[in-house]
Image (spheres, rainbow, N blue to C red):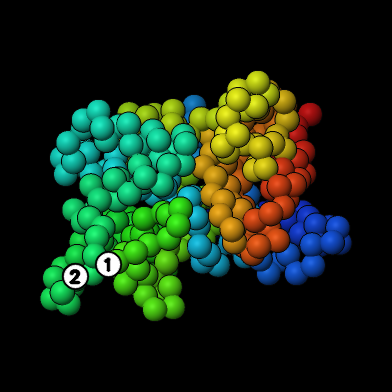
Amino acid sequence: MAFYSPSPAMEQTLADLVRALELQGRTGLGQRLSITWVRYPSSPRLSGAAAGTGASWAGSRQRYPASVVKLVYLIAAEAWLQDDLLVDEPELRRALAAMIQDSSNDATGLVVDLLSGTTSGPALPAAVMVGWIEQRQLVNRWLAGLGWPELEGVNACQKTWGDGPFGRELEFYGASLENRNRLSSEATARILEAVMASALVSPPACGRMQALLARSLDPGLRAADPENQVDGFLGEGLPPGSLLWSKAGWMSQARHDAAYVEAEDHDPFLLVVFSEGEACAADSTLLPEIARRLSAACRVG
């Protein structure tokens, strides 16, 4: 059972969109794409109530989330703070801001260390490594405790990297990288919806997270920041003047984005798109086009 009310009309819109994108020359795109799209009659951000209608394309398929996993670590940090498992100090707040606003991998490494009580480094003796691995599963156990069916199969225990893991971190990935992070667009959408509706951890914590996720569509600010997480992602395809909260992920084999949008004359909507493969990663027009078409479908009046 989805966390939104399924809409056959929206399902058809998604199917038509994927078909159209493939006909533009993106052969096989449907196999490399996951989309979850939820439309709301009023703003969950303002009302605290999320009762949307929605649809998905391969929404339950687990994919490598790249930097979208940083959204999970942000929420976990707020949950740890609420339970007095972390000290609320300036360096943690600086790291959380850099992790979300700038998508810093270095900051993410510190956050994961603090959440799990582990550190990176050389290989460990087998007996010690067992305890280290147990600690690194703390975020996964917390996610499982939420009891949300969308989170089944999710894996959020790895740091994010520029050059890749070394030492004990590489061993933890597994010989075939079988322990990489995994998220689905459905899981990501439910998590983001809860943040925007102030329904996870606490309303003040959600307010802090919303502030970090807010993106400016101002052309001047975007031009001054090539890593703005708008251009080449969903935000680029939104109507002028839209309000956007999002977390993007981009690496050599993936281009993803998770966004909540409010725009004049449009129903508020949430859109998560995961696209896999080298061609998708290099396609800076794919996510903006998806956002452009689906936001148009949310227009009212």
Vertical placement of residue 212 versus 4, above or below: above
Residue drawn at (21%, 32%) of the image: 88
* Residue identified by numbered label 1: 168
| Count of marks, rendered view | 2
Quadrant in the picture for residue 220 = top right
Element type where label 1 sits in the image: helix
Is 12 left, or right, of 167 in this rendering?
Answer: right
Q: Which residue is nearer to you in this view: 185 or 70?
A: 70
Q: Which residue is nearer to you in this view: 65 or 282?
A: 282
* Residue identified by numbered label 2: 124
Instruction: Answer yes or no: is residue 57 visible.
Output: no
Give the Cα distance between marks 1 and 2: 6 Å
Quadrant in the picture for residue 238 = top right
Query: Amino acid type of disc 2?
Result: Leu
Residue drawn at (33%, 37%) of the image: 95
Residue drawn at (56%, 37%) of the image: 227
Disc 2: CA contacts within 10 A as few (<14), some (14-19) or many (>=20): few
Element type where label 2 sits in the image: loop
Cβ atoms at labels 1 and 2 below 8 Å apart? yes
x and y percent of residue 184 in the render? 51, 60
Residue drawn at (65%, 27%) of the image: 223
x and y percent of residue 68 in the render? 49, 50
Instruction: Answer yes or no: is residue 237 visible.
Output: yes
Disc 1: CA contacts within 10 A as few (<14), some (14-19) or many (>=20): some
Q: Residue furthest left?
A: 127
Is 27 left, or right, of 139 in this rendering?
Answer: right
The quarter of the rendered structure image containing the C terminus is top right
Query: Amino acid type of disc 1?
Result: Arg
